């Protein structure tokens, strides 16, 4: 029967109109509620594409095993209640396609997540659905939207999250139905994308350099023992005795160290940095003496500018004991004054200068992550501060 004739073929509105609530008909169980004058209609015959719906309770009808409804197929809803006939028609929309986030993306537990997609046709709206274990959440977006931002507090922390998008299209109802009746059909789910919500990793190199490589990885206050690290393609195993990832890998001064950090199958990011040229201390010289009334000026040469230098001085504090001081200096500096009155007098001092590159980090790392790649000078021995 054509939709145009349904109103004429049905009983008059004076006998009471029907409120139809038929949302998201499509794949999966289909639910249709039929009510009249605020009461559920329990004796109607409801079919969806000729598949009979069973009455569940209070005017709600369920098709538990609906016929296949691929994109572009028509959905015919037929409700016969006594002498009244209600009918709806709709077309199943095409499934959207998610374009962001990329699969296996990483997000901090404080970051919002923007979901973007493409879709065809004029649509009534979208459902953005996230799943993390048993935690399933649905967010509503408008028919003109192609982007929805999920607030960080609405997502689980430290978990993998699957997101998909479902399109909705409005159907047309005819017959004695109320103005607030609804009929919509849903698409198949878009391509599911899995992203991970996690705490950013702090990566701190332990004086990496031309031979020995040590890296400490933490997440918040916890040492991370299950990360997968590679350095220039070589696996870096975890050393539980020291709480670091350590390996021997020879790289000449000027060569690059490339550190890749993964966890739970996801690449957290990459850090790269050059091994600095070892600085050459030009003053003082071995065995020089100075008085405590003036600073001890240390000078050095370096043909490159590392991110920073560290100038150090150490001395014996007894048998098998050494102590000292070290100072951070800008990478453009070539001289630094050690305060003479803060150094022990009449004691052999050992002076050194290290160049450091912090590395460039791309990925899910804390802002204070550093590779700490070191180029070290030969120490100057036997320098003394005299008391007069």
Image (tube, rainbow, N blue to C red):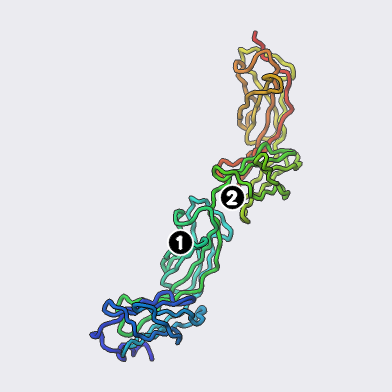
Mark 1 surroundings: few (<14), some (14-19) or many (≥20) residues within 10 A:
some
In the rendering, at what x and y percent does residue 319 appear? 71, 20
Query: Nearest the camera: 84 or 45?
Result: 45
Residue drawn 30% across the image and 89% down it: 10
Q: Is residue 90 above or below residue 382?
A: below
Which quarter of the figure is the C terminus placed in? top right
Residue drawn 48% across the image and 70% down it: 166
The residue under label 2 is 363
Q: Are marks 2 and 1 in contact (CB under 8 Å)?
A: no
Query: Nearest the camera: 329 or 2?
Result: 2
Furthest-left residue in view? 14
C-alpha span from label 2 to label 1? 23 Å
Which quarter of the figure is the N terminus placed in? bottom left
In the rendering, at what x and y percent does residue 261 appear? 64, 49
Residue drawn 49% across the image and 76% down it: 27
Query: Nearest the camera: 29 or 150?
Result: 29
- SS at mark 1 in the image: strand
The residue under label 1 is 148
Residue 64 disc label:
none
In the rendering, at what x and y percent does residue 51 appear? 45, 85
Q: Earlier in the sequence, mark 2 or mark 1?
A: 1
Q: Is residue 67 above or below residue 83?
A: above
Q: Quadrant of residue 378?
A: top right
In the rendering, at what x and y percent does residue 212 appear? 73, 39
């Amino acid at each position: 029967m054509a939709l145009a004739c349904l109103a004429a073929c049905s009983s008059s509105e004076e006998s009471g109109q029907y409120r139809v609530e038929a949302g998201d008909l499509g794949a999966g169980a289909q639910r249709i509620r039929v009510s009249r004058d605020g009461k559920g209609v329990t004796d109607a015959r409801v079919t969806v594409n000729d598949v009979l719906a069973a009455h569940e309770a209070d005017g709600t009808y369920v098709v538990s095993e609906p016929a296949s409804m691929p994109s572009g197929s028509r959905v015919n809803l037929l409700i016969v209640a006594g002498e009244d006939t209600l009918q709806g028609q709709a077309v199943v929309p095409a499934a959207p396609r998610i374009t962001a986030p990329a699969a296996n993306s990483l997000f901090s537990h404080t970051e919002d997540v923007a979901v973007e997609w493409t879709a065809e046709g004029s649509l009534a709206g979208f459902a953005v659905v996230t799943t993390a274990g048993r935690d399933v959440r649905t967010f509503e977006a408008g028919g003109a939207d192609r982007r929805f931002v999920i607030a960080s507090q609405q997502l689980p922390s430290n978990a993998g999250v699957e997101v998909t998008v479902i399109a909705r299209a409005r159907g047309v109802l005819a017959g004695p139905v109320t103005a607030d009746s609804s009929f919509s059909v849903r698409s198949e789910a878009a391509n599911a994308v899995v992203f991970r919500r996690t705490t950013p990793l702090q990566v701190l190199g332990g004086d990496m350099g031309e031979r020995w490589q040590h890296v400490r990885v933490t997440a918040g206050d916890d040492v991370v023992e299950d990360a997968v690290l590679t350095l220039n393609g070589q696996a870096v195993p975890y050393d539980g005795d020291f709480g670091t990832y350590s390996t021997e890998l020879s790289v000449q001064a000027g060569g690059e160290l490339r550190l890749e950090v993964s966890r739970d199958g996801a690449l957290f990011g990459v850090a790269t940095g050059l091994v600095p040229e070892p600085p050459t201390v030009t003053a003082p010289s071995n065995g020089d003496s100075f008085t405590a009334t003036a600073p001890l000026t240390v000078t050095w040469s370096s043909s490159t500018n590392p991110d920073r230098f560290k100038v150090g001085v150490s001395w014996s504090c007894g048998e098998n004991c050494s102590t000292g001081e070290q100072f951070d200096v800008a990478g453009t500096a070539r001289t630094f004054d050690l305060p003479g009155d803060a150094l022990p007098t009449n004691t052999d001092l050992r002076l050194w200068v290290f160049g450091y590159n912090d590395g460039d980090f791309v990925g899910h790392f804390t802002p204070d992550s550093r590779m700490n790649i070191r180029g070290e000078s030969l120490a100057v021995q036997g320098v003394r501060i005299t008391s007069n």
